[in-house]
Amino acid sequence: DLALLKFNDVDVNYADLSVGIIADISGFNMAAKGKMKDNLLAGDMDLSMHELVYQQLTDSLSMAVKLNNLKAEGEAEMLGDNFKADIDVSSSDLLYESEGQIAEFKSLTFRYKGDVNNYDKVNADVEMSVNDLSFVMDDEALVKEADIRFISPFSVTLSTMDVEFGNSQIALNNMFIDFIGEASMPGDDIVVNLDLKTNTLIIKELIELIPVSMREDLLAGIDVDGELNISAKVDGVYNETSMPQVDAEITYNNGMLAMPEMLPYPITNLNT
Protein backbone atom coordinates (compact mmCIF):
# COMPACT_ATOMS: atom_id res chain seq x y z
CA ASP A 1 0.00 0.00 0.00
CA LEU A 2 1.09 3.54 -0.77
CA ALA A 3 -0.28 5.56 2.15
CA LEU A 4 0.71 8.95 0.73
CA LEU A 5 3.12 10.45 -1.78
CA LYS A 6 3.20 14.23 -1.67
CA PHE A 7 5.01 17.14 -3.34
CA ASN A 8 4.46 20.76 -2.37
CA ASP A 9 5.31 23.91 -4.33
CA VAL A 10 7.95 22.39 -6.61
CA ASP A 11 9.59 24.46 -9.35
CA VAL A 12 11.25 22.83 -12.37
CA ASN A 13 13.46 24.59 -14.92
CA TYR A 14 14.71 22.87 -18.07
CA ALA A 15 16.74 24.18 -20.98
CA ASP A 16 18.29 22.56 -24.04
CA LEU A 17 19.77 25.39 -26.04
CA SER A 18 21.04 23.00 -28.72
CA VAL A 19 17.43 22.65 -29.91
CA GLY A 20 16.21 26.01 -28.58
CA ILE A 21 13.97 24.61 -25.82
CA ILE A 22 13.23 26.33 -22.52
CA ALA A 23 10.57 24.97 -20.14
CA ASP A 24 9.53 26.15 -16.69
CA ILE A 25 7.04 24.68 -14.24
CA SER A 26 6.19 26.64 -11.10
CA GLY A 27 4.05 25.80 -8.09
CA PHE A 28 3.67 22.07 -8.77
CA ASN A 29 1.76 20.14 -6.07
CA MET A 30 0.78 16.49 -5.97
CA ALA A 31 -0.77 14.10 -3.47
CA ALA A 32 -1.28 10.44 -4.37
CA LYS A 33 -2.12 7.19 -2.66
CA GLY A 34 -2.84 3.70 -3.89
CA LYS A 35 -2.60 -0.04 -3.44
CA MET A 36 -1.50 -3.07 -5.43
CA LYS A 37 -2.49 -6.65 -4.71
CA ASP A 38 -2.34 -9.61 -7.10
CA ASN A 39 -3.69 -8.24 -10.40
CA LEU A 40 -5.40 -5.22 -8.78
CA LEU A 41 -3.88 -1.75 -9.02
CA ALA A 42 -5.86 1.18 -7.66
CA GLY A 43 -5.18 4.72 -6.58
CA ASP A 44 -6.25 8.33 -6.50
CA MET A 45 -4.34 11.52 -7.19
CA ASP A 46 -4.72 15.26 -6.79
CA LEU A 47 -2.31 17.59 -8.59
CA SER A 48 -2.06 21.26 -9.42
CA MET A 49 0.37 23.52 -11.19
CA HIS A 50 0.50 27.30 -11.01
CA GLU A 51 2.17 27.88 -14.37
CA LEU A 52 3.75 26.03 -17.27
CA VAL A 53 5.85 27.94 -19.81
CA TYR A 54 7.34 26.25 -22.87
CA GLN A 55 9.35 27.97 -25.59
CA GLN A 56 11.14 26.64 -28.64
CA LEU A 57 13.06 28.86 -31.00
CA THR A 58 15.07 27.51 -33.93
CA ASP A 59 15.82 28.64 -37.46
CA SER A 60 12.69 26.82 -38.69
CA LEU A 61 10.33 27.05 -35.70
CA SER A 62 9.15 29.65 -33.23
CA MET A 63 6.65 28.48 -30.61
CA ALA A 64 5.55 29.58 -27.15
CA VAL A 65 2.99 28.01 -24.82
CA LYS A 66 1.79 29.32 -21.46
CA LEU A 67 -0.70 27.41 -19.31
CA ASN A 68 -1.96 28.67 -15.95
CA ASN A 69 -3.62 27.06 -12.95
CA LEU A 70 -3.83 23.48 -14.16
CA LYS A 71 -5.67 21.15 -11.78
CA ALA A 72 -6.39 17.44 -12.06
CA GLU A 73 -7.93 15.00 -9.63
CA GLY A 74 -9.42 11.58 -9.82
CA GLU A 75 -9.20 7.91 -9.11
CA ALA A 76 -8.46 4.88 -11.24
CA GLU A 77 -8.47 1.12 -10.88
CA MET A 78 -7.01 -1.65 -13.03
CA LEU A 79 -8.04 -5.24 -12.52
CA GLY A 80 -6.49 -7.64 -15.00
CA ASP A 81 -7.43 -6.43 -18.49
CA ASN A 82 -10.11 -4.06 -17.20
CA PHE A 83 -9.64 -0.41 -16.30
CA LYS A 84 -11.94 2.27 -14.91
CA ALA A 85 -11.37 5.91 -14.05
CA ASP A 86 -13.11 9.04 -12.81
CA ILE A 87 -11.06 12.15 -13.68
CA ASP A 88 -11.59 15.93 -13.56
CA VAL A 89 -9.22 18.39 -15.24
CA SER A 90 -9.40 22.20 -15.34
CA SER A 91 -7.25 25.15 -16.32
CA SER A 92 -7.79 28.88 -16.10
CA ASP A 93 -6.15 29.96 -19.35
CA LEU A 94 -3.86 28.97 -22.21
CA LEU A 95 -1.87 31.03 -24.70
CA TYR A 96 -0.22 29.44 -27.76
CA GLU A 97 1.82 31.39 -30.33
CA SER A 98 3.61 30.01 -33.37
CA GLU A 99 4.45 31.25 -36.86
CA GLY A 100 1.70 33.86 -37.18
CA GLN A 101 -0.84 31.76 -35.25
CA ILE A 102 -2.24 32.70 -31.85
CA ALA A 103 -4.69 30.51 -29.91
CA GLU A 104 -5.99 31.17 -26.43
CA PHE A 105 -8.82 30.36 -24.05
CA LYS A 106 -9.79 31.67 -20.62
CA SER A 107 -10.93 28.43 -19.00
CA LEU A 108 -11.20 24.72 -19.68
CA THR A 109 -12.94 21.91 -17.84
CA PHE A 110 -12.88 18.23 -18.72
CA ARG A 111 -14.61 15.29 -17.03
CA TYR A 112 -14.20 11.61 -17.86
CA LYS A 113 -15.91 8.73 -16.11
CA GLY A 114 -15.85 5.29 -17.63
CA ASP A 115 -14.31 1.88 -18.00
CA VAL A 116 -12.30 -0.12 -20.52
CA ASN A 117 -12.87 -3.87 -20.75
CA ASN A 118 -10.28 -6.24 -22.23
CA TYR A 119 -8.36 -3.25 -23.59
CA ASP A 120 -11.03 -3.02 -26.29
CA LYS A 121 -14.51 -1.94 -25.17
CA VAL A 122 -14.81 1.60 -23.81
CA ASN A 123 -17.95 2.84 -22.03
CA ALA A 124 -17.72 6.42 -20.83
CA ASP A 125 -19.38 9.74 -20.08
CA VAL A 126 -17.41 12.77 -21.22
CA GLU A 127 -18.05 16.46 -20.57
CA MET A 128 -15.84 19.26 -21.85
CA SER A 129 -16.13 23.02 -22.02
CA VAL A 130 -13.80 25.70 -23.35
CA ASN A 131 -14.64 29.35 -22.70
CA ASP A 132 -13.54 32.46 -24.60
CA LEU A 133 -11.65 30.53 -27.27
CA SER A 134 -9.93 32.72 -29.86
CA PHE A 135 -7.76 31.85 -32.84
CA VAL A 136 -5.86 34.31 -35.01
CA MET A 137 -3.95 33.45 -38.18
CA ASP A 138 -1.93 36.02 -40.11
CA ASP A 139 -3.55 38.87 -38.14
CA GLU A 140 -7.10 37.73 -38.98
CA ALA A 141 -9.41 36.54 -36.20
CA LEU A 142 -10.90 33.23 -37.37
CA VAL A 143 -12.49 32.48 -33.98
CA LYS A 144 -13.26 35.19 -31.43
CA GLU A 145 -14.16 34.53 -27.79
CA ALA A 146 -16.22 31.43 -28.54
CA ASP A 147 -17.66 29.11 -25.90
CA ILE A 148 -17.59 25.41 -26.83
CA ARG A 149 -19.26 22.59 -24.92
CA PHE A 150 -19.45 18.85 -25.56
CA ILE A 151 -21.40 16.25 -23.59
CA SER A 152 -21.67 12.61 -24.61
CA PRO A 153 -22.23 9.15 -23.17
CA PHE A 154 -20.63 6.79 -25.66
CA SER A 155 -19.21 3.33 -26.21
CA VAL A 156 -16.31 2.42 -28.50
CA THR A 157 -15.04 -0.95 -29.70
CA LEU A 158 -11.41 -0.19 -30.50
CA SER A 159 -10.72 -3.37 -32.48
CA THR A 160 -13.47 -2.57 -35.02
CA MET A 161 -13.59 1.23 -34.58
CA ASP A 162 -17.33 1.18 -33.88
CA VAL A 163 -18.74 4.10 -31.88
CA GLU A 164 -22.22 4.42 -30.42
CA PHE A 165 -23.36 7.78 -29.07
CA GLY A 166 -26.10 8.14 -26.50
CA ASN A 167 -28.06 11.39 -26.15
CA SER A 168 -25.21 13.84 -26.83
CA GLN A 169 -24.80 17.54 -27.41
CA ILE A 170 -22.22 19.86 -28.92
CA ALA A 171 -22.63 23.60 -28.51
CA LEU A 172 -20.99 26.72 -29.88
CA ASN A 173 -22.02 29.86 -28.02
CA ASN A 174 -25.85 29.83 -28.13
CA MET A 175 -26.09 27.20 -30.87
CA PHE A 176 -26.79 23.62 -29.81
CA ILE A 177 -26.75 20.39 -31.80
CA ASP A 178 -28.26 17.33 -30.12
CA PHE A 179 -27.32 14.01 -31.68
CA ILE A 180 -27.60 10.27 -31.17
CA GLY A 181 -26.52 7.34 -33.29
CA GLU A 182 -23.60 5.28 -34.53
CA ALA A 183 -20.41 5.65 -36.55
CA SER A 184 -17.74 3.19 -37.63
CA MET A 185 -14.55 3.08 -39.70
CA PRO A 186 -14.28 -0.24 -41.56
CA GLY A 187 -11.11 0.24 -43.58
CA ASP A 188 -10.93 3.64 -45.27
CA ASP A 189 -14.69 4.24 -45.14
CA ILE A 190 -16.61 6.16 -42.51
CA VAL A 191 -20.11 4.77 -41.96
CA VAL A 192 -22.57 6.96 -40.07
CA ASN A 193 -26.15 6.69 -38.85
CA LEU A 194 -26.92 9.82 -36.84
CA ASP A 195 -30.01 11.79 -35.88
CA LEU A 196 -29.37 15.52 -35.40
CA LYS A 197 -31.46 18.40 -34.12
CA THR A 198 -30.62 22.04 -33.44
CA ASN A 199 -32.16 24.62 -31.19
CA THR A 200 -33.42 27.84 -32.78
CA LEU A 201 -30.46 29.34 -34.62
CA ILE A 202 -30.30 33.09 -35.15
CA ILE A 203 -29.01 33.87 -38.65
CA LYS A 204 -27.10 36.99 -37.60
CA GLU A 205 -25.31 35.00 -34.90
CA LEU A 206 -24.32 32.39 -37.47
CA ILE A 207 -22.99 35.10 -39.77
CA GLU A 208 -20.88 36.53 -36.95
CA LEU A 209 -18.98 33.22 -36.86
CA ILE A 210 -17.71 33.74 -40.42
CA PRO A 211 -14.30 35.46 -40.54
CA VAL A 212 -14.59 39.12 -41.54
CA SER A 213 -12.77 38.79 -44.88
CA MET A 214 -14.99 35.89 -45.99
CA ARG A 215 -18.10 37.63 -44.70
CA GLU A 216 -17.36 40.74 -46.72
CA ASP A 217 -16.88 38.70 -49.90
CA LEU A 218 -19.91 36.46 -49.45
CA LEU A 219 -22.42 39.02 -48.18
CA ALA A 220 -21.36 42.28 -49.78
CA GLY A 221 -24.50 44.39 -50.17
CA ILE A 222 -26.72 41.76 -48.54
CA ASP A 223 -28.44 41.92 -45.15
CA VAL A 224 -30.18 38.78 -43.93
CA ASP A 225 -31.73 37.66 -40.64
CA GLY A 226 -34.22 35.17 -39.25
CA GLU A 227 -34.58 32.05 -37.13
CA LEU A 228 -33.54 28.62 -38.33
CA ASN A 229 -34.34 25.14 -36.98
CA ILE A 230 -32.82 21.98 -38.44
CA SER A 231 -33.71 18.34 -37.84
CA ALA A 232 -31.79 15.78 -39.90
CA LYS A 233 -30.88 12.13 -40.33
CA VAL A 234 -27.44 11.34 -41.76
CA ASP A 235 -27.09 7.77 -43.01
CA GLY A 236 -24.53 6.19 -45.31
CA VAL A 237 -20.87 5.92 -46.26
CA TYR A 238 -18.30 8.65 -46.58
CA ASN A 239 -15.21 8.03 -48.73
CA GLU A 240 -13.51 9.43 -51.81
CA THR A 241 -16.44 8.58 -54.07
CA SER A 242 -19.56 8.77 -51.89
CA MET A 243 -21.30 10.90 -49.28
CA PRO A 244 -23.92 9.87 -46.70
CA GLN A 245 -27.54 10.59 -47.49
CA VAL A 246 -28.95 13.54 -45.55
CA ASP A 247 -32.70 13.83 -44.97
CA ALA A 248 -33.40 17.19 -43.35
CA GLU A 249 -36.36 19.26 -42.24
CA ILE A 250 -35.52 22.96 -42.13
CA THR A 251 -37.80 25.71 -40.90
CA TYR A 252 -37.06 29.40 -41.42
CA ASN A 253 -39.13 31.97 -39.56
CA ASN A 254 -39.20 35.73 -39.06
CA GLY A 255 -36.88 36.00 -42.03
CA MET A 256 -35.60 39.20 -43.61
CA LEU A 257 -33.60 39.79 -46.78
CA ALA A 258 -32.35 43.16 -48.01
CA MET A 259 -30.35 43.67 -51.23
CA PRO A 260 -30.51 47.41 -52.02
CA GLU A 261 -28.71 47.05 -55.33
CA MET A 262 -31.22 44.48 -56.62
CA LEU A 263 -34.42 44.95 -54.59
CA PRO A 264 -36.05 48.34 -53.97
CA TYR A 265 -37.47 47.19 -50.65
CA PRO A 266 -36.40 44.54 -48.12
CA ILE A 267 -38.34 41.30 -47.97
CA THR A 268 -39.64 40.69 -44.46
CA ASN A 269 -41.70 38.18 -42.50
CA LEU A 270 -40.35 35.17 -44.42
CA ASN A 271 -41.65 31.89 -42.98
CA THR A 272 -41.48 28.30 -44.17
Image (tube, rainbow, N blue to C red):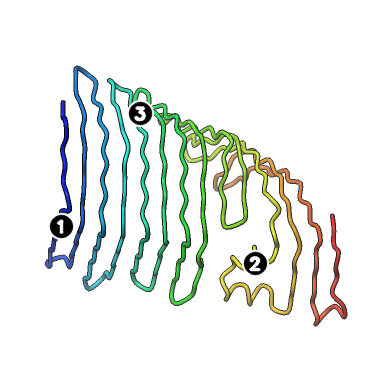
Mark 1 vs mark 2: in front: 1
Residue 6 % position (x, y):
16, 42
Residue 25, relative to residue 20: is it above or below?
above
At x 76% / y 46%, what residue is drawn? 249
Q: Secondary structure at mark 1?
A: strand
Which residue lies under the disc numbered 2? 207
| Residue type pointed to by label 3 | Lys
Residue 103 % position (x, y):
40, 65
Mark 3 vs mark 2: in front: 3
Q: Looking at the image, is mark 3 or mark 2 earlier in the sequence?
A: 3
Q: In which quadrant will I find the N terminus?
A: top left
Residue extending farthest to the top is: 38
Q: Secondary structure at mark 2?
A: helix
Task: Choose between 146 and 17: the one closer to the eye.
Answer: 146
Task: Choose between 193 and 150: the one closer to the eye.
Answer: 150
Q: Are marks 1 and 3 in contact (CB under 8 Å)?
A: no
Q: Secondary structure at mark 3?
A: strand
Task: Choose between 56 and 26: the one closer to the eye.
Answer: 26
At x 80% / y 68%, what residue is drawn? 256
Residue 136, relative to residue 67: is it above or below?
below
Q: What is the spatial separation of the Cα atoms under label 1 and label 3, in whole angstroms? A: 31 Å
Q: Is residue 77 left or right of residue 260?
A: left
Residue 196 % position (x, y):
65, 43
Which residue lies under the disc numbered 3? 84
Which residue lies under the disc numbered 1? 11
Residue extending farthest to the bottom is: 261
Mark 1 vs mark 3: in front: 1
Q: Looking at the image, is mark 1 or mark 2 earlier in the sequence?
A: 1
- CA neighbours of label 3 inside 10 A, class few (<14), some (14 to 19), many (20+): some
